[in-house]
């Protein structure tokens, strides 16, 4: 269980990676405790809605994509979510780029596993 959440998905992915290693046969479930009505909840909900709208419905893939975001992208997303009137188009572009990067990584990993 993650009690002290970082606003950085990469940090969350790193935490998950400490218990869910490649080749592991046991299933690992990570729980994120987010308080209702906080910026963290608003941000999380907005990002997941955007990913779902883009056709990414698998929760593991959603987390993997969010783990690709760098600090600058994080700041832009947090700012867009915080300011209700901001156009979410930039958030969509950031998520699209992160998904593309994640897809490339998956393809390369698959190639390595087949070798």
Image: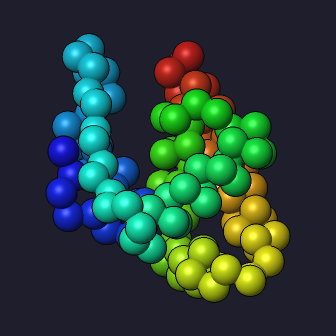
* Image position, residue 87 (x, y; %): 79, 77
Res 55 → quadrant: top right
Q: For the image shown, how many numbered marks are present on the structure?
A: 0
Chosen colour scheme = rainbow
Which quadrant is home to the C terminus? top right
* Image position, residue 93 (x, y; %): 78, 65
| Left or right placement of residue 76 versus residue 74 in this view | right
Which quadrant is home to the N terminus? top left
- Residue 25 position (above or below residue 21): above
- Residue drawn at x 32%, y 61% as measured from the top left: 35
- 114 vs 72, nearest the viewer: 72
* Image position, residue 86 (x, y; %): 74, 82
Q: Is residue 101 visible?
A: no
- Residue 63 position (above or below residue 113): below
- Residue 78 position (above or below residue 53): below
Q: Is residue 80 visible?
A: yes
* Image position, residue 23 (x, y; %): 31, 21
Furthest residue in direction front, as rendered = 37
- Residue drawn at x 20%, y 64% as measured from the top left: 4
- 81 vs 105, nearest the viewer: 81
- Residue drawn at x 37%, y 61% as measured from the top left: 36
- Residue drawn at x 58%, y 25% as measured from the top left: 110
- Residue 113 position (above or below residue 10): above
């Amino acid at each position: 269980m993650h009690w002290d959440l970082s606003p950085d998905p990469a940090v969350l992915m790193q935490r998950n990676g400490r218990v869910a290693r490649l080749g592991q046969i046991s299933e690992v479930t990570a729980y994120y405790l987010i308080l209702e009505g906080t910026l963290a909840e608003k941000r999380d909900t907005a990002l997941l809605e955007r990913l779902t709208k883009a056709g990414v419905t698998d929760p593991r893939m959603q987390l993997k994509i969010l783990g690709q975001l760098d600090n600058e992208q994080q700041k832009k997303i947090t700012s867009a979510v915080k300011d209700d009137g901001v156009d979410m188009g930039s958030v969509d572009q950031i998520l699209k780029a992160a998904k593309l990067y994640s897809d490339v990584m998956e393809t390369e990993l698959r190639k390595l596993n087949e070798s």
